[in-house]
Every structure is written in C-alpha cells, then in structure tokens.
C-alpha cells in the first residue's frame, strides 16, 4: 500500500527528492517541501525526526547507507499512516514498518514529531 498521490502531487514530491538527494544531507529541506504536498492528501501531515534512542548515542543507522554516512538524525514526513522521505521516495512506507525496513537496529532509534520550521534540522 502506498500514499494516494495524484500524478501532479507525486511529481512534486519526487521533485523535492531530486532537488535534495539523500547524499546532500538535506532531508529536512526535502521534508519542508513534501509536507506542503502531503497536507493536500492528509491535513494532519507533519514532520518526524528519527534520532538515536540511547543517551550519548550520536548517529542513526539507515540500512541503505550503513555504516556511512554518519547521520545524527533523519527527517521524514508522516502522511496518511505512511512515512515519506528520500529513503522511501513518493510511495512511502507504512509507519508501522518504517523503522524496521529502513534502519538497522530499529530498537535503538526513536521517532518523534518535529517542527519543520526549526533551523537546526
């Protein structure tokens, strides 16, 4: 199951990922663009931040890139019970399986709502 984007919406979401590829470490910038489109589908769409769960831990472990690059966090968009970001692209991943599918040792990560207007993301 994927997010039910229109063709135009899907194009705008994919455009955000083209403009801000994962390797550029600009996931928050991509999320800021995606959430605007996501709110057309689900008004409750919001930013979410993935970070290390353990005190003193410094990095998250995305499956696609482990062990490099070293990400201190990652930002995704919650839309229609999915997470949408550069790891999932426009189809998204059901929120229930997102951490397990896209991060090593998902139990060592925490996902929480985040204000996408924060400049420190």
Image: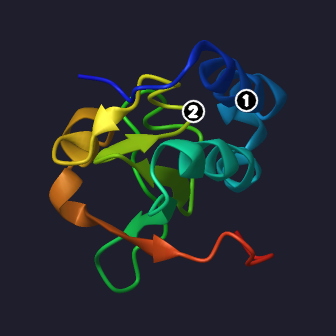
The reply to whether discs 2 and 1 touch (Cβ–Cβ < 8 Å) is: yes
Q: Which of marks 1 and 2 precedes in the sequence?
A: 1
Question: In this view of the protein, which residue sits in the foreground, 94 or 120?
Answer: 94
Residue at point 43%, 56% (across, down)? 60
Residue 70 seen in the current view: no
Q: Residue furthest bottom?
A: 55
Picture quadrant where residue 75 is located = bottom right
How busy is the neighbourhood of tag 1: few (under 14 within 10 Å), some, or many (20 plus)? Answer: some
Above or below, 54 relative to 36: below
Taking 2 as reference, is 39 left or right? right
Give the color scheme: rainbow, by chain, secondary structure or one colour.
rainbow
| Marking on residue 91 | none
Picture quadrant where residue 17 is located = top right
Classify mark 1: helix, strand or loop.
loop
Per the model, the C-alpha gap separating discs 2 and 1 is 7 Å
Percent across and percent down for residue 87 are 48, 31
Residue at point 65%, 30% (across, down)? 13
Residue 49 seen in the current view: yes
Classify mark 2: helix, strand or loop.
loop
Above or below, 42 relative to 5: below
Percent across and percent down for residue 89 are 52, 25
Percent across and percent down for residue 35 are 62, 52
Residue on which the image places disc 1:
21
Q: How many labels, in total?
A: 2
Question: In this view of the protein, which residue sits in the foreground, 60 or 50?
Answer: 50
Residue at point 73%, 78% (across, down)? 118
How busy is the neighbourhood of tag 2: few (under 14 within 10 Å), some, or many (20 plus)? Answer: many
Residue at point 37%, 69% (across, down)? 52
Question: In this view of the protein, which residue sits in the foreground, 108 or 74?
Answer: 74
Percent across and percent down for residue 105 are 20, 49
Taking 101 as reference, is 90 left or right? right
Residue on which the image places disc 2:
86
């Amino acid at each position: 199951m994927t997010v039910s984007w229109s063709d135009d919406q899907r194009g705008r979401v994919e455009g955000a990922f083209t403009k801000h590829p994962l390797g550029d470490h600009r996931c928050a910038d991509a999320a800021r663009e995606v959430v605007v489109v996501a709110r057309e589908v689900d008004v409750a769409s919001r930013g979410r931040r993935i970070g290390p769960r353990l005190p003193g831990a410094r990095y998250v472990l995305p499956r696609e890139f482990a062990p490099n690059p070293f990400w201190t966090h990652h930002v995704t968009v919650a839309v229609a019970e999915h997470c949408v970001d550069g790891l999932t692209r426009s189809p998204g991943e059901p929120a229930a399986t997102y951490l397990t599918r896209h991060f090593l040792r998902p139990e060592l990560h925490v996902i929480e709502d985040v204000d996408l207007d924060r400049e420190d993301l």
